[in-house]
Image (cartoon, rainbow, N blue to C red):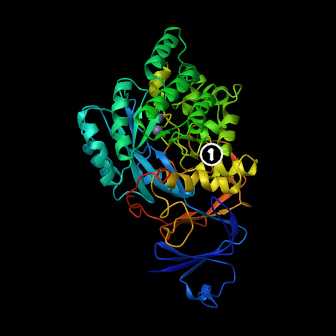
Amino acid sequence: MSTMLIRGGTVVSATGRGAADVLVDGETIVAVLAPGSTVLGHDLAASVDTVIDATGKYVIPGGIDAHTHMELPFGGTAAIDTFETGTIAAAWGGTTSIIDFAVQTAGQKVFDGLAAWHEKAGGNCAIDYGFHQIVGGVDADSLDALPKLIDEGITSYKMFMAYPGVFYADDAQILRAMQVAAEHGLMTMMHAENGPAIDVLVAQLLEQGKTDPYYHGVARAWQMEEEATHRAIMLAHLTGAPLYVVHVSAKQAVEQLAAARDRGQNVFGETCPQYLYLSLEEQLGAVSEKYGAFEGAKWVCSTPLRSRAEGHQDHMWQSLRTNDLQMVSTDHCPFCMKGQKELGLGDFSKIPNGIGSIEHRMDLMYQGVVTGELTLERWVEITSTTPARMFGLYGKKGVIAPGADADIVVYDPNGHTSIGMPVDENGNPTGKKHHMNMDHAAWEGFEIDGKVDTVISRGLVVIQDDQFHGRAGHGQYLRRGLSQYLV
Ligand code: DUC
Ligand code: ZN
Ligand code: ZN
């Protein structure tokens, strides 16, 4: 077992910051020491195998992205990042654990869907990974499987109030699943949009010749998100099921969550970087020389990017500060323009839904610290500590403390990160490039006043000196406990 000392840095947790040295033995943090401490010897640096100098830098628990979709089949194609490429990109960005969504579709056995996800991920991940279970077909069989997932280390499952004919669950199905979940302490995750009503609006817009990506955002109006969020909260209230609403983008949906929390309900919400920074007007409505108004396809995702004029983005930042929203995940679901997003040329409803952000989440949220939207501690909390607690990983993940896995990021506040992949007229990259599989950058031109310096995954240095030192297969499957926010 090798030993490592990360010294000279400022250790930041969800509750505070302070100068401290971190000692790692093998895969585990064994001590957090006051600088100059001699409790473990007079020259600890001389007696360890590796010393990492974190002077002037922050030392934080590795990021946890609790919402990713590697290789997700969607809209006649599949998300382009494999577990290998997606987890390597995650590591580059300071994320050391992901929770991906195993998929069960209607008519399929839950455990067959889960086995397929283990097959895709096993031996291929560069960082640790866990699963939530998508239940795309709520029936007697899947209801029976739900509690058994807990023994597999899966303590959360997701249903969709959107996508009729694909993943959609109706109110009766949701009620039944929540009854089972409430009994066993499973977290119900909800994609809260009124899918049947949205489909009517989509058909009407297409009939009117409104086929550009912009209309994806028009069809998926905020009222559709607020209404579904309210309905999910009411069904959760009735059944006593804890509820976690994914990818919240509408300020009115947050108001529903806040009201439920004020009533004392176990209701939680995540948002994603795209709902904090991007908008209906600027991205979905973008026009470029190469793609014309189809440029906006790069940002077609659901829930959709919302109108900046309506103030949703500012409200998301505020809600993260006030804890009306508890955490930030990416909903990483990348598709290339070529051959994938292009499926929706002339019909926005055929554009595969998703944006790739796994590599940029820690940086984009750190920029919120720079601009005064978040404190340093809140940054750590919403990107690592809360995701760990929410999904039963805390203690092992989400904290720098003796006994925790040595998942550590050294972050340089004096560094700089330019995001993007400029291309020549033939589409060939001419400069800096991200490590996700997509052929474009959804975050082109974003500048971050900070930089991921060193990333350690269970004691292994995976990123250092702008090089990837890890390997696919290092990442282990995470068996999760029940949510640690529930009593
Ligand atoms: N939303 C997306 O944008 N992509 C995948 C599935 C989803 O709900
Ligand atoms: Zn979703
Ligand atoms: Zn998703």
* In-front residue for pair 431/345: 345
Residue occupying image coordinates x 27% and y 32%: 139
* In-front residue for pair 296/65: 65
What is the quadrant of residue 4 in the picture? bottom right
Residue occupying image coordinates x 58% and y 52%: 383
Number of marks present in the image shown: 1
* In-front residue for pair 101/185: 185
Q: Amino acid at mark 1?
A: Gly
Q: Residues within 10 Å of mark 1 (few under 14, many from 20)?
A: some
Q: Position of residue 294 (x, y in %)?
A: 56, 25
Instruction: List the single residue furthest toward the top.
Output: 208
Rendered view: 369 above or below 350: below
Can residue 377 be seen at all in this image of the molecule? yes
Instruction: Report the side of 416 relative to 31 (left or right).
Output: right
Instruction: Report the side of 156 relative to 95 (left or right).
Output: left
Can residue 113 be seen at all in this image of the molecule? no
Return the residue at label 1: 420
Rendered view: 47 above or below 148: below
Image quadrant where one finds the N terminus: bottom left
Q: Position of residue 298 (x, y in %)?
A: 55, 33
Q: Position of residue 29 (x, y in %)?
A: 52, 73
Q: Position of residue 121 (x, y in %)?
A: 36, 53
Residue occupying image coordinates x 33% and y 39%: 180
What is the quadrant of residue 33 in the picture? bottom right
Label 1: element kind: loop
Residue at disc 1, CB closer than 8 Å to ligand 1? no
* In-front residue for pair 400/165: 400
